Amino acid sequence: MLLEALKLALQAIRRNALRSFLTVLGVVIGVGAVIAMVTIGNGTTEKVRAELAKLGSNLLFARPGQFGPGRSSATAKPFTARDVEAIKAQMSGLRAVAAVAQSQVTVIAGSENRATLAVGTDNGYFVTQDWPLALGRQFLESELRGGSATCVVGQTVREKLFGSADPIGQSIRVNKVSCEVIGVLQAKGESSMGQDRDDLVLMPIRAFQRRIAGKSDVSTIYVSAESGADTTKIQAAMERLMRERRGIGMGKEDDFSIRDTRQIAETMTGTTAILTGLLGAVASVSLLVGGIGIMNIMLVSVTERTREIGIRLAIGALERQVLTQFLIEAVVLSIFGGTIGILFGLGLAWIATGVMEIPFVFNGGIVALAFAFSALVGVVFGYFPARRAARLDPIEALRHE
């Protein structure tokens, strides 16, 4: 019986091919929009997670001042090298600590010059930032203690100043300071804000403070926790230590801020996940519209085929057989639309993720859910027209013109 009903449903759909196509178009758009929006949202979440991972693993960073509405960091005193040493000496569970000071500079090599970012730091920077070298070596302890004018350059600086030539052992001028290139960082590419991470020059922090900045301030302290360490406890311990060193009394607000990149990552990915859910919910409204379209067309089909239904009932067809025929017709339309919608949505998401330069994250669960929902739409919105057809009075149906 089901097979015969399926054949009749397919015949009815083929007889009105254009109308059937327009009917399923709403389902196609609905399913496609849900899949595309969720896939793009998942790709965005993955991109945010990957960008934050580039900042370093188990990373915390401290900066003078408080940031946010109504807060100012202008009056907060900067960190010093002694603060960095205190963190190294008094805190446990740390893999590396790096002091950082930075400034915009002009670098010159031969006839080439470029405005870039100079970062004064130490070897802890390579660990906290998960940033290995592509060429050369890190700073020697003697260079860090004595403030030698040596530097490690990013890939962008290397390409702009030296092209394909080997920069190791070459000299560049950082503002007015002659600096020997001892290493080249591996490429990290652009950040999510479009900033080129590779456009920088690293120098021993003492050399930077004396010869570039002219002051001993430390603008940021990076702390990388050991694998498996509780960064929440490390953050609390670091806050207590900084409050003690900066003489902040009980009940007074911190004049510094410490952030955990894991917490930032969780917040940002949670936000993008919520937005993805909202986009998917908005897109699913079009599925309901498609379901209403199916119900409308099926009601028209019942009206057009009233005499046919009357003949079937008069020669012995049961109500449930007529109900099944029209219900299967509605389900076939919705499933057909759902299948095309899946392909349309995945194709649209693939194109969009390529244009937006975000990962294409296939979610089998949402594809299955969208397909099941499209079938459910056929059942729900096809039931009422099918029931109307099954309850027609055979005598009145045969009189229908």
Image (cartoon, rainbow, N blue to C red):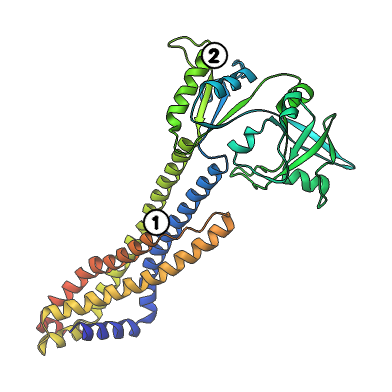
Horizontal arrangement in the rendering, residue 316 relative to residue 255 (left or right): left
> The C terminus appears in which quarter of the rendering?
bottom left
Residue at image point 80% right, 34% down: 106
> The N terminus appears in which quarter of the rendering?
bottom left
Residue at image point 15% right, 88% down: 311
Per the rendering, the mark at residue 249 is none
Q: Provide residue 133's location: percent of width, then percent of height.
A: 68, 44
Residue with the most extreme right position: 111
Horizontal arrangement in the rendering, residue 400 relative to residue 77 (left or right): left
Q: Nearer the viewer, residue 38 or 31?
A: 38
CA gap between label 1 and label 2 equals 54 Å
Q: Which residue does the numbered mark 2 point to in the structure image?
A: 245
Which quadrant would residue 54 be assigned to in this image?
A: top right
Q: Which residue does the numbered mark 1 point to in the structure image?
A: 283
Residue at image point 67% right, 20% down: 217
Type of amino acid at the residue the image marks with label 1: Ala
Which quadrant would residue 150 be assigned to in this image?
A: top right
Q: Against 349, is 177 above or below?
A: above
Bin the neighbour count of mark 2 within 10 Å (Cα to Cα): few under 14, some 14-19, many 20 and up: few
Helix, strand or loop status at disc 1:
helix
Type of amino acid at the residue the image marks with label 2: Arg
Disc 1 versus disc 2: nearer the observer: 2
Q: Against 123, is 369 above or below?
A: below
Q: Earlier in the sequence, mark 1 or mark 2?
A: 2
